Amino acid sequence: MLYAKHYCSQFHPKYNANIADTVKANNAAAIMAAATYTAYVASATVSLRGLTAETDVGTVTISGAPGVPNPGFGRLATTLLTVAVIFLGGMVASRWAATGHAPISDLYEFTATFGFGIAAAYLAFETFMRQRRFGVLALPIVCIVLGIATLFPTTITPLIPALQNGPLLTIHVSVMMISYAVLTVAFCGAVVYLAQGGEGHRRFGSLPSAEASADLAHRAVIIGFPLLAGGIALGAWWANSAWGRYWGWDPKETSALVTWLSMAAYFHARAGNGSVAGAPGIRRIVPERIRRGWRPDPMWWLVIMWALVMFTYFGVNLWISGLHSYTGM
Amino acid sequence: MAADARPRAAIPSSFDPFKFVWGLLTNVKFALVLVGTAAFAGLIGIVLPQVPGPMRGNAAAKAAWLELRRQDFGMFTTPMDRLGLFDVFHTVWFNGLWVLIIVAVTVCTVSRFLPTWRSVHRPTRSVGDGYFDRAHHRASFTQPGGADAVERLLKKRRYAVERTRTDPDGTVYLFAERFSWSQYGTFLSHLALLMLLVGALLTRFAGFNETFVIGENTPAVPVFADPGPNQLFVQMDKAVRGTDPTGNVVDFHSIVTVRRGTDTVTCKVTVNDPCSAFGYKIHQAAFFNDIAKLHVTDGSGRLIWDDLVDFQSETNAVPTLRVTGPDNQVLFEGDLPQMSTDTSGALPQARAVLSVPGQDGAAPTVFGATWRVTNGVLRLTMSSLGTGATIGQPDLMPGDSVHQGPYTISYVQGHAIPAITLLKFPGAPTPDTPVTLQMPTGADGKTSLYISGLDGGGFQLAQGRPVISPSGDTYSYNGQVNASGVSVKRDPGSTFIFVAVIMALVGLAITFYIPRRRLWVRVQGARTSLAGVAERTTRFSRELRLMGAELGARDALQEGDLGET
């Protein structure tokens, strides 16, 4: 630890070069994992085609049967992902040692840690739910996030006074980051579900079934939703301590609330069977013809939710100034 | 016509407004409309620029701010302003929307209590045979163990199991349930929103929150408008902004003394650590280092002003210059404040006069300087005051130097110095005459005050060196003062808010993580049918099939149940 602190110290001239090397190594591991997950899913497509070739000559046509992916690619993909998670975890730990606080105080640190969070959250869900094929979507997102992290300044600067609350900085920002990471996994589930055409449909045999996708998305949301609620509540508590008020409609806190509301809408949409057109009052306003056709799947709310996560994360920090503009840029 | 003329019997309208409103507020789809609208409105408030808080109560300031927005929104600016799109979070419609959400949550909470209680304590224990064929979550398989084996498995999985019926043909019906009380979870999380509302109302209407800007070593500020025995006074003993060797701000703190009667509390307040005194909390809300202490007396020595001048973070861009003589002796170094505006050219330019002290008792040499900011860079032109001829090249950039006789004038940098225009300033010809004050910094790091707009032009005030204006008033600048924005707060709603957050999180945890299941079982010979409800999983059918497999049924599982699907 002492070695790390000395070696990674901001005063050490090699530190920035080391960051660049570490980021490259991490990105390489994540890219390799993403490529292997793609190969894994592609192997299921190949097995599907083989099945079609065998049956084409006969009278039986099998369509939409689940493809069987190559288990070797699957094991390799998970191993590479585990290696990437260990590398990223090491990067987070070394940055923590160098700065003396959780590495979540500027956009570089937060984005790099976010990449680690998504990879770790996905690995946990993959292990728990025994669903490996969502990696074809989750890992490219990890690579993109890590790529974006490299665009931000990596220089360590001292914490500004508003952030000098070690426990709350660590807990509040970590909880927000973990919730965003878990919600990214939910987004992956929702996208596959919608790509499959919803419950009872299966457009792509090589991808997970709509039911399995909905299950993953829902399980991830029920973890991400309370985490985000807890993160917002902790932020309000900190705001009261720092600025003397719980809530000030600052763009970042409002955007987090809007993200949370989008998930509340998802839960209500599930309970209300998707459409708002049947609500009393709305029923009287919206013509029957539109009402019948207007039944968006609740899963669309999770797609909107993730767009809002990205907006809260990058949009508000980079383009809208507020009390949370700690971009380091 | 005759028939039409007969009086008709009054037919009561079937429309019941109370029932309609109640139905609307308890409707989950309407809740979705409300939640979606609140999210959309919040998004508008984030994306569109919002009127800064201090301008909200100042019509003139708000109008000026809106004029700036007109560059982006053009003809839509006024209608957008009328709709409140530049102040979304304080509009009637936005707050009304939240009131409606809170009312809907209240109605929903009230209306769902009895059904929830009934569902937990008096559930439907028997279902018709048709339910086993059409339930969303169901499974059917052949297993050898009969009803006893099913009962044992369910009990092992923490279900409360009850035999509801045994038919003469031996068909056994079971009802099993697990964690039915978890239905109270959503009730608790909805109730938390109401508790949050109570807390927020108490904070808003029974709490106290006032912010003061208090300078170091200035008289104590009274907290309440009405004097009385409970009056509090806050004095700023020290307002500190600490920087590290590279100039990064690493510390803001204040040492304050709070007094009530003869009791005093002295404490340190940081951004993250408010201090408590007499039931109130003192928060560090801001730090200011652009405050000047000014003292003015009239010709008869009567004090007419002894107060702080708060520059309110307003600034003016001026050049920092360094003038050296023939032997490289520094004759002037510091910021050159703007003294007037030159409007003769195509673009207005700031103008000032630089007076360099003469050597060996000679008269001072005077230069003219004009500048304007283009593309974020201050471009400076020096001229000879007598002839008006430009010295060296025009539009000097930071780092450039020009020579005039024995003098070398170096343009060091552009610098934003505190600057503000005030009305009703002491010594101004009329109360409506604008007077501009600037606070430039000299080579020694000390600030001075430049005042323009009074009778007779402008003058510079060095610290501790009073100046008598043409009208006979004496102005003394007593230096720059550090000040802190301090919020004094009492929040009786905080306990409610804390409890509400705990309730919400516990409610969500119960709702999401306690896996409630309700199951009906029919065991008809070797054939076992299961059907049930589970809110937190979309794959309850698979769970039922896996139970069948555990019971030894060979026909329970479907493709993909044990692997990836």
Image (cartoon, coloured by chain):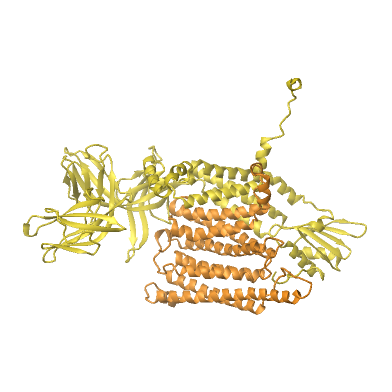
**Which quadrant would residue A155 be assigned to in this image?**
bottom left
Number of numbered labels in the structure image: 0
Looking at the picture, tell me which residue is in the foreground, B408 or B132: B408
User: Position of B3 compared to B357: left or right?
Assistant: right
**Which quadrant would residue B535 be assigned to in this image?**
bottom right
Chain drawn orange in the picture: A
Q: Quadrant of the N terminus of chain B?
A: top right
Name the residue at 17% across, 42% down.
Answer: B456
Looking at the picture, tell me which residue is in the foreground, B138 or A1: B138
Looking at the picture, tell me which residue is in the foreground, B518 or B454: B454
Can residue A102 be seen in this snapshot?
A: no
Chain drawn yellow in the picture: B
User: Position of B335 compared to A59: left or right?
Assistant: left
Name the residue at 69% across, 75% down.
Answer: A49
Can residue B112 be seen in this snapshot?
A: yes
Name the residue at 66% across, 54% down.
Answer: A270
Q: Position of residue A147 (x, y in %)?
A: 49, 70
